[in-house]
Amino acid sequence: MNRHAINIDTVIQDIEVYAVVSSNGRFQYISSNSVELVGYSNNHIIGKYIKDFIHSEDVFLLESYFFNEHHLYPCTFRFLTDDGHYIWLEASLDFIRSTVTKHNQEIVLRMKALDTKYPVNQLGLENKLSAIDGNSEKNAHDHLLEDLPSPLFIASYGKILYVNKAFEELLGTSSKEQLIGKYTIDFIDKSFHDIVWYRIQKLHNGEKIGIIEQTWRKLDGNEINVEVSANLTTYNGEKVELIVLTDISSRRKFQKILQKSRERYQRLIDNSIDTIAVIHKDKWVFVNDSGVKLFEAEDYSEMLGRNIFEHLHPNDHKHMKDSLNSILKGEAEVQITNQSWIISDEKTIYTEMVGIPTTYLGDGAVQVILRDISDRKKTEELMLRSEKLSIAGQLAAGIAHEIRNPLTAIKGFLQIMQPEYKKHQQYFNIVFSELDRIEVILSELLILAKPQEKKFKKANMVTLLQDVAMLLETQANLNSVSIEQIHEEKDLSLFCDQNQLKQVFINLFKNAIDAMPKGGNVKVHTKKQNGKIHIMVKDEGEGIPSELMERIGEPFLTTKEKGNGLGLMITYKIIEDHNGTIVVDSKLNEGTTFIVELPLE
């Protein structure tokens, strides 16, 4: 009696391979056991791009995994082995960020094969067939192969010698005669023919081959996707191929649906005008392109690993921490908050943030959507300022009307009484001085109360500033203050209301002088830049407290003991009417700088 046994070896061991990939996708390191899993030595792989080894259909999935791992499970992909076929690998990763340079980042991959053994070996065929002492090949195959659930066939250099029922059903045939005697390439897509012959040659040369995915065609022409595992066995005294197929059409269909879903999700993220990001342990671990632009970073990698509190305004730190903790603890699934971010010394942006819970590498994290509301906030501030001006104007009109009439009567009677009280002349002088002060305040109020007729004509700003400096020279000398003027160009002409602009700079010069009771220097610097005239007025005074900086220009806001807070309000209004802007910078005990920008046209 003959003993017929199928010798099936374990081809893929339960191997874990570790690799390090740089931020540009090159292998920096791979463990030496890579040769056991994919057939390449580590020297062959190091320095090459990982995408050169990945199946073209899986490249996008792997890239998505690298950059969006916070919402993906461990990634599966096909890896090209040294014998030219692909095997399925499962990978997880960790990020390593350089502490020396902020642009370098490495990714540690931990990879292993999805199937550690061939399906035929899982069925225990080797043990079963070797244990049978049959009278013929047919008896052995009838008992052990015919009713196996896995599609299986035996071939000699690609020519089919035997098929089981499951294989017949897979290809949609009604009898074995439709298959036996034909070549496997008759049912395999042309793109796989070369690799099929290559694998057969390796198998007969005694080399081990792994699982490969192929596209086959049923007899009715419909395509099916299968995984193919092969081993060498003996049939009628001849070395032949034992091939086992696994139908993966449903898996491939689901994978394509999943891939398209991920691609759509990725496009939504990439093309969103809002910043979409993930915060893990107070650090950015993912930011889309809009976020990179919002924070004016050079590229994506510059943001990764950066602490979120680097840019967040100090006033918002506590609120942000409380909000993130609340989301992570599940106290609130969705939170909407407002905050400001300091991008540079000259730029602060305001955002509205929506935060929702998510995970990052299995750990709790927060996904946020940031919307830039800087323009909206600026508009709201302008509306509020306009409202205040309107209210102040109405109030001013009422005050001026109610006070001016009795004031005229009081002043007239005091002038009549003055000659009779010559002994108290000093008191009359004080009273008249204070009455004059009241009239000045009323005049300023009336500027707000009723629109002033504007007389625009061409004027030279340099000449105008020199006239203002000369007008206030006496007051400056009395306070030990010198006014230094630097004009980069002698002719800075523009169309304006000369009298109104004189009022603006009289206010700014007087404020600068008053800010230095112990004396100092007032620097006036003018230049032409980007189609505008820049006029800088800088003092060396005590500065303006930070809590008042945002309120500058409000009516009746002043730091002076005898000030009324209307000078700067009128100044802002005049500059606004001239389509200009005023920027204020102040540091305590160092001084204050006012920069007025006026368009040339």
Image: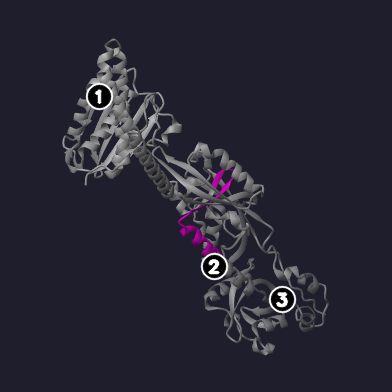
Where in the figure is residue 6, as x and y percent of width and height?
74, 73
How far apart are the alpha carbons under marks 2 and 3? Answer: 30 Å
Residue shown at the point (64%, 79%) measured from the top left: 156
Image position of 95 with respect to 461: above or below: below
Q: Is residue 512 left or right of 298 when viewed as pictured?
A: left
Q: Secondary structure at mark 2?
A: helix
**Amino acid type assigned to the residue bearing label 2 in the image:** Lys
Of residues 540 and 475, the one nearer the viewer is: 475
- Give the quadrant of residue 553: top left
**Tag on residue 483?**
1
Part of the protein shown in magenta: 259-284
Does the magenta segment cover residue 223? no
Where in the figure is residue 89, as x and y percent of width and height?
62, 61
Q: Earlier in the sequence, mark 1 or mark 2?
A: 2
**Amino acid type assigned to the residue bearing label 1 in the image:** Ile
Q: Earlier in the sequence, mark 1 or mark 3?
A: 3
Which residue is tagged 3? 150
Residue 150 visible at all: yes
